[in-house]
Amino acid sequence: MNEIIETFHVDYKMLIAQAVNFAIILGVLYKFAYGPMVKHMDARSKLIEKGLEDAKSAGEKLAAAAKEREDKILQAKKEARQIIEDAQLQAEKSKGEIVDQARVESEKVVEQAKEQIKNEKEKMIVEVKKEIGTLVIAATTKIIGEEIDEDKNAKLIAKTIQEAGN
């Protein structure tokens, strides 16, 4: 071993000094470089993990919000469809009511027209009868050649109207 030491010119003192220097540099690097770097890398890893968890959570929330939006859209479509159906039913019902009301009104107008025609007919008949009575009196006066008094005139008119009515 001595031969090896002399062949390679190993100096123990220098070797020990270099080992102490290496230990000091290793200690200083560990304390000021490796330790803070490990802490920084741990913090960065935790930050990245938190970011991934937040992204996953945000993705889940986004999917839930999209599903909720779709559910609300479907619900709104169902409600709109129901409102349209209700409106159509109401329109049909209103249409039927309006038609019935129009039918009743038209029947009422027809009845009123018939009544008015009947009243007008009766008035015309009474007027025609009076006119016939007047004509009969005038014809009788011309045929007889004399004036008929009021009593005879009234009786003759009544008799003529009665015969004309039969």
Image: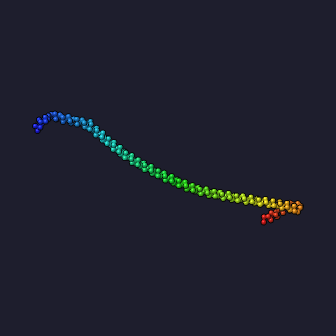
Residue 154 appears anywhere in the view: no
Rendered image coloring scheme: rainbow
Quadrant (top left, top right, bottom left, bottom right) of the N terminus: top left
Quadrant (top left, top right, bottom left, bottom right) of the C terminus: bottom right
Give residue 129's quadrant in the image: bottom right
Q: Nearer the viewer, residue 145 or 14?
A: 145
Residue 121 appears anywhere in the view: yes
Q: Nearer the viewer, residue 92 or 34?
A: 92
Drawn side of residue 150 relative to residue 73, left or right: right
Residue 55 position in % (x across, y down): 37, 45
Outermost residue toward the right in this view = 146
Give residue 161's quadrant in the image: bottom right
Q: Which residue is drawn at 82% across and 63% down?
A: 160
Q: Residue at x 18, y 34 (%)?
A: 18
Query: How many numbered dots are placed on residues in this image?
Result: 0
Residue 26 position in % (x across, y down): 22, 37
Query: Compared with residue 54, is residue 136 higher up or lower down, i.e. above or below?
Result: below
Q: Which of 20 and 83 is in front in this view?
A: 83
Query: Compared with residue 60, is residue 26 higher up or lower down, i.e. above or below?
Result: above
Residue 33 position in % (x across, y down): 27, 36
Drawn side of residue 46 relative to residue 27, left or right: right
Q: Residue at x 88, y 60 (%)?
A: 147
Residue 63 position in % (x across, y down): 40, 49
Q: Which residue is drawn at 87% across and 61% down?
A: 142
Outermost residue toward the left in this view = 3
